[in-house]
Amino acid sequence: MNALFTKTYEDNASGKLSDERFMMLSKRYDDEQLALKKKVSALQAEIDEEEKHKRTAASFLRTVRRYTDIQELTPTILNEFVEKIVVHQAQGVGKGRSQQLDIYYNFIGKLDMPEVACLPQSVTVDTRQGVAVEYITRKAG
């Protein structure tokens, strides 16, 4: 870009390019250079953000690998995994009462778990010709 501007300046100085044309090209080069600088800055910000995510995910995985066989959840282990827990207002009454908890993990933040569909009352599976097995689900507790 600078080489183009230098060439344009030299052409203007030698009389090959009018002052009006030089000013127009000069403005165009300046605008293009400014746009390119903004684009480079935005792309660098994206790269920095991706690098940050990569580092935090790697840190989380190191912590997970350290505790692959947890027998008892201790405050130390909990503090290594959990940044904070947000407890929302309870809704409903009695057995229909529910309360949302948001768990924010260290390094990765809040992890949204997919909704779990309710299991049917019973499931029948044909294991082989003429034989059907029925599994009846029951509530935990």
Image: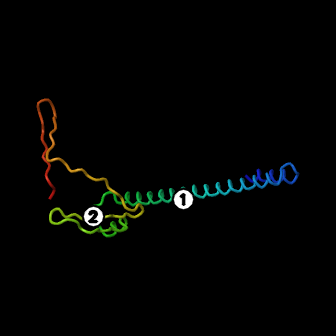
Does residue 42 appear to the left or right of 21 in the view shown?
Answer: left
> SS class of the residue under badge 2?
loop
Numbered-mark total: 2
> SS class of the residue under badge 1?
helix
Q: Which mark is residue 100?
A: 2
Identify which residue is drawn at 32% across, 55% down. 113
Q: Position of residue 60 (x, y in %)?
A: 41, 60
| Residue named by callout 1 | 48
What colour scheme was applied to this rendering of the protein? rainbow
Tell me, yes or no, whether the two marked residues, 2 and 1, touch with CB atoms within 8 Å. no
- Classify residue 65 by image quadrant: bottom left
Q: Is residue 133 above or below residue 111?
A: above
Kind of residue indicated by mark 1:
Asp
State the residue lying farthest toward the front: 20
Q: Position of residue 87 (x, y in %)?
A: 29, 68
- Classify residue 44 by image quadrant: bottom right
Q: Is residue 24 above or below residue 88?
A: above
10 Å neighbourhood of mark 2: few (<14), some, or many (≥20)?
A: few
Does residue 116 appear to the left or right of 130 in the view shown?
Answer: right
